[in-house]
Image: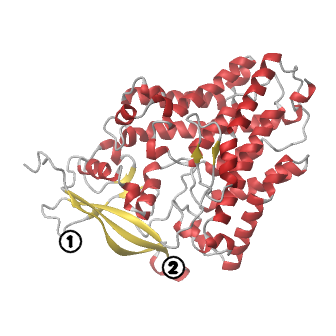
Amino acid sequence: MDWFTAPDYWLGRLLFQRSLAVIYLVAFLGAALQFRALLGERGMLPIPRFVARMPWRRSPSVFHLHYSDRFFAAWAWAGCAVSAALVAGADSLLPLWGGMLLWLVPWVMYLSIVNVGQTWYSFGWESLLLEVGFLAVFLGNDEVAPPIVVLFLLRWVLFRVEFGAGLIKMRGDECWRKLTCLYHHHETQPMPGPLSWFFHHLPKPLHRVEVAANHITQLVVPFLLFTPQPVATAAASLMILTQLWLVLSGNFSWLNWITIVLALSAVDVGTGAPDSPGAPLWYEIVVLAMTALVLWLSYHPVRNMVSRRQVMNRSFDPLHLVNTYGAFGSVSRVRYEVVVEGTADEVPREDAGWLEYEFRGKPGDPRRWPRQFAPYHLRLDWLMWFAALSPAYAHPWFGGLVERLLENDRDTLRLLRRSPFPADAPPRFVRARLFRYRYTTWRELRATGACWERTYVREFMPPTRLAVPTARDR
């Protein structure tokens, strides 16, 4: 079928596939380096405990069949290896069916991780990576030109990401309709980046222009993705510029980057396509069957998107094939942070020698400037932001974090920037306090060198010690 492929998009496919493989690599690397403290056998939310109560049909995963920390580590590092091979273009060295199978491997492997990841893997970009990764299986390699229907489905994902995010804003916090949300967002976002302080101090009229431009990009421009070229390329390019602006303004894991990757698949670079044979019949049948499945599964996400009770970031099937997305339907006006401290003193009085634990990404020491981590995802730091919003968000795992800090657990301490206690001398007590954080002004920054000013609000968790005394305490 001559209409089945679009040879002019071969370079767009190449850029899309290699970039997606990089995101897979970052995702697997984060899993390999962080899982022991979060999900391991002695983690805060152990996988063995989860799979014992969760049926396989609701969370398909290889870890229902077997779990050990060593097996998970091998699984995650193998995912890194496969992703690196795809970055290097290994799929183009295989026959068409072999390339498809190679792209299927990281999707299956990451699905197994997400489906047992619990709270740590509950973010929308996890499902987005799986949905996009599933479609990538059917894009083909150098043996065939890119299938038009798969390119259409990638634009369909991009449309739902942008339009869904736009709708949730217009239906949510009134500050989006008043164009004032960016008066607060750069200060209160989950994990500020090195430029967020400067973004926050932009003139308020410019903030209003930013919000208005965002509404246009998310509510109008997505429809242009389905128009003829060069309009579709212009729409995708505008989305890329908007996402790069967001990359500069904060740390949002790989959400912005995978949106950019999706937009690359819609760009017509106008270069000549290399010669490629026609698509084999079996490939056309498989791709069309997959397309019918995706369109059928799109019913619930579309129904949610047009509903007045729209929800963000939900999967409607355990394979995360077609999902609903959205971000920041509401914006906090005040930033709170949970500060975790420990003491070696025998009595945890207020004037005891309390020392603060330093996290890698979340605000702590007011003088420490935020760093850029995205697209790498610091899962504990992100959940600490939610904990500051409400203790209910922290209930499943915060007690486990404190217990491991009291033990000086090596894997947990690796998630932090610095522990104030030597490896052989854990704290006797750990407590948590809630502070209000605000960005300093230009004058305060010059005078103190601090980018944050913080004020004590209340106790978040009273001084706590291990129920069973350690050898040091006996």
Residue furthest left in the image = 474
Q: Quadrant of residue 85?
A: top right
Residue 27 locus on image (x, y percent): 55, 40
Residue 455 in sight in this render: yes
Task: Decide which of tag 1 and tag 2 comes sooner along the chain.
Answer: 1
Query: Left or right: where does residue 334 sit relative to residue 414?
Result: right
Observer-nearest residue: 355 or 380?
Answer: 380
Q: Residues within 10 Å of mark 1 (few under 14, many from 20)?
A: few
Q: Residue at x 55, y 35 (%)?
A: 318
Q: Residue at x 83, y 17 (%)?
A: 280
Vertical order, 215 against 252 (above or below) = below
Residue 149 locus on image (x, y percent): 81, 34
Query: Left or right: where does residue 237 sit relative to residue 394?
Result: right
Rendering colour mode: secondary structure
Q: CA distance from mark 1 to mark 2?
A: 32 Å
Amino acid at circle 1: Glu
Residue 350 image label: 1
Residue 104 image label: none
Residue 3 locus on image (x, y percent): 91, 29
Q: Secondary structure at mark 1?
A: loop
Residue beneath disc 2: 446
Amino acid at circle 2: Arg
